[in-house]
Image: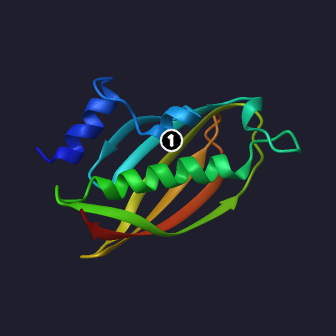
Amino acid sequence: MNEKIQYLKDVIDGKRSPPRIAQLLGFRIIDFCEGCTTVEIDIDERFYNPMNTVHGGIFCDIADAAMGISFFTTLKDNESFTSVDLRINFLKPVKSGRLTASSKILHRGKRLGYMECEILNEKKELVAKASSTCIITQK
C-alpha cells in the first residue's frame, strides 16, 4: 500500500497524529478516496472576524486542506507537492455549527492537478466554493 494512503488511514483511525494545522484549527479528515477528500470543522466564536461571522481564512484553510489531501492521494511515495494557487468564493456567512469541505480532482496531469471544493454548513447549504492548482515536486 502507498505510504501516503496508509498515513491517511492511520490519521482517521487515530493511530497517527493529524497534520499540525489540523491540530491547531481542529479540523478532521473524515473520508478520502483516490482524488477526493472530506474534512470537517466545528465552528465557534474563536473563528470570528470583526463582523462576528467565521473569518474567510478558516474557509480557505479547510478548502486548501481538503484539496491538498485529494491531490496527496494521487502521489507516488517519492513525490511531494505544493499549491500553485487558491481561489475561493464566499457565498453565505457562518456563525456556528459544523462545516464540511468536500473536494475532488477534476484534472490530474503528469505535473499539475486542478481541484474543486464545496463547503457546506450543517443544513447542507453551500457556503463557499474553492478551486486550486497543485504541482508535483520531488522529495
- Give SS at disc 1: helix
Measured from the top left, where is residue 99 in percent x and y?
60, 38
Q: Residue at x 61, y 54 (%)?
A: 60
Dividing the picture into quadrants, the one containing residue 95 is: top right
Q: Residue at x 48, y 62 (%)?
A: 116
Q: Residue at x 28, y 76 (%)?
A: 111
User: Depth check: 12 or 82 in front?
Assistant: 82
Question: Residue 57 vs residue 72: left or right?
Answer: right
**Quadrant assignment for the C terminus:** bottom left
Q: Residue furthest top?
A: 14
Number of marks drawn: 1
Query: Which residue in the structure is indicated by mark 1?
Result: 21
Dividing the picture into quadrants, the one containing residue 110 is: bottom left
Does residue 53 lie above or below 97 as drawn?
A: below
**Quadrant assignment for the N terminus:** top left
Does residue 42 lie above or below 3 as drawn?
A: above
Measured from the top left, where is residue 51 in percent x and y?
89, 44
Measured from the top left, where is residue 20 in percent x and y?
46, 38
Question: Residue 65 vs residue 111: left or right?
Answer: right
User: Depth check: 133 or 91 in front?
Assistant: 133
Three-letter code for the amino acid on which mark 1 is drawn = Ile
Question: Residue 7 vs residue 68: left or right?
Answer: left
Q: Residue furthest front?
A: 139
User: Depth check: 101 or 83 in front?
Assistant: 83
Q: Residues within 10 Å of mark 1 (few under 14, many from 20)?
A: few
